[in-house]
Image (cartoon, grey):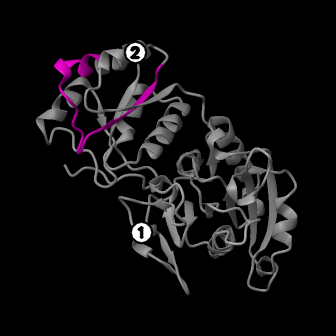
């Protein structure tokens, strides 16, 4: 019996068409295009149904409300399909993959995000292979989690980052191996597929629009300029530091800001600006002040995953102390815990 796959189309380059203002998604365009592709109607293809989100968006306009809409669309159809493929623009695909990884609790079916760098309407579009392989992966059911497939690699959704603005292998997983490589055959890495077991039936945790900030450290940064945002409204901060968690001294300006944020109920998570490796607070003296001020290590989490995780934990109604305790613990395979 053929597997049934739901294709959720959110917008993005894969289904865009030329307009006087540049490429843009057109409602009602993609369905006939997919139906006319012989690869999607042949005996090897799973049965599929296209669900078009409204409105269709360039992914630069996708945020919390849209994450919730996609998550809800999957959850409401969860029992009707064997897997899901989410067509999405590349700019924020890794953020959406991270968000869905957390908000879809106890997931036991594949949810595969994909898209393209070149629209399907163009001769050299990479969207055809990305879509076909994503459908097969969703139907095979081996990667029963939120994943991102692009350019021959299947990545864990909460480990993925966009690394190229115009390359056809646009995504990477810097601190975790691919879940699968697609060549002549799709070869799964059984060890990489391992992650925490479901703790109950599938559930959806919609995100609240929690005030969260991302602050990138750079040489010469004047931390006092950021004091006005450290108000009682701010709930979470992701601090992108140098190396393994180091910050410039700048006359000790940052630790008081962190303490102030903590007193106001905010959680500061430290991530590294480096593409590979992670944070080891306390390894160098330059990071000791962060630990002393109450910051928590994001280990080798990406910024995309850290942002999504903060939204998720605060949306569950947890206290700042509870959130802080869970930020450095793997919930979806999003991080490698520090050695203790």
Q: Say which residue appears at 69% left-offset and 72% top-offset.
A: 128
Please identify the quarter of the rendering in which residue 196 is found: bottom left
Residue 320 lies, with reference to residue 10, above or below; the image says above
Residue 236 lies, with reference to residue 7, above or below; the image says above
Residue 325 spot, x, y in % from top left: 35, 36
Q: Is residue 12 visible?
A: yes
Residue 183 spot, x, y in % from top left: 53, 82
Number of the label disc, if any, that sits on residue 248: none
Magenta residues?
234-257
147 and 16: which is toward the camera? 16
Between discs 2 and 1, the one toward the N terminus: 1
Q: Magenta includes 249? A: yes
Number of the label disc, if any, that sits on residue 264: 2
45 and 10: which is toward the camera? 10
Crowdedness near tag 1: few (<14), some (14–19) or many (≥20) residues, C-alpha within 10 Å: some
Q: Say which residue appears at 69% left-offset and 45% top-offset.
A: 58
Q: Is residue 145 visible?
A: no
Residue 274 spot, x, y in % from top left: 31, 49
Disc 2/disc 1 C-alpha distance (Å): 39 Å
Q: Magenta includes 178? A: no
Residue 38 spot, x, y in % from top left: 81, 80
Number of the label disc, if any, that sits on residue 192: 1
Q: Say which residue appears at 74% left-offset and 85% top-offset.
A: 44
């Amino acid at each position: 019996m053929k597997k049934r796959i739901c294709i959720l189309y959110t917008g993005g380059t894969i289904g865009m068409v030329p307009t006087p203002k540049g490429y843009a998604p057109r409602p009602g365009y993609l369905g006939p295009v997919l139906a006319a592709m012989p690869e999607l109607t042949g005996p090897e293809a799973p049965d599929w149904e296209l669900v078009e989100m409204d409105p269709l968006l360039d992914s630069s306009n996708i945020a919390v409300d849209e994450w919730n809409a996609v998550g809800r669309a999957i959850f409401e159809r969860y029992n009707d399909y064997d897997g899901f493929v989410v067509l999405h623009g590349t700019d924020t695909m890794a953020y959406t993959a991270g968000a869905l990884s957390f908000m879809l609790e106890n997931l036991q079916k594949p949810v595969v995000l994909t898209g393209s760098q070149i629209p399907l309407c163009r001769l050299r579009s990479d969207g055809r292979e990305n879509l076909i392989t994503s459908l097969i992966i969703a139907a095979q059911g081996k990667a029963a989690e939120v994943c991102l497939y692009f350019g021959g690699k299947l990545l864990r959704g909460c480990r993925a980052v966009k690394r190229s603005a115009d390359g056809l292998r646009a995504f990477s997983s810097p601190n975790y191996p691919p879940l699968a490589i697609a060549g002549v055959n799709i070869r799964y890495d059984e060890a990489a597929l391992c992650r925490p077991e479901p703790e109950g039936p599938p559930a959806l945790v919609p995100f609240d629009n929690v005030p969260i900030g991302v602050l990138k450290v750079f040489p010469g940064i004047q931390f006092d300029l950021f004091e006005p945002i450290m108000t009682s409204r701010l709930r979470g901060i992701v601090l992108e530091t140098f190396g393994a968690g180091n910050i410039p001294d700048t006359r000790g300006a940052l630790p008081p800001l962190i303490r102030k944020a903590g007193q106001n109920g905010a959680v500061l998570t430290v991530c590294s600006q480096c593409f590979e490796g992670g944070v080891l607070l306390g390894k160098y003296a330059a990071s000791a002040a962060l630990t002393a001020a109450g910051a928590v290590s994001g280990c080798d989490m990406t910024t995309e995953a850290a942002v999504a995780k903060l939204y998720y934990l605060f949306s569950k109604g947890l206290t700042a102390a509870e959130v802080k305790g869970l930020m450095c613990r793997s919930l979806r395979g999003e991080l490698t815990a520090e050695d203790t």
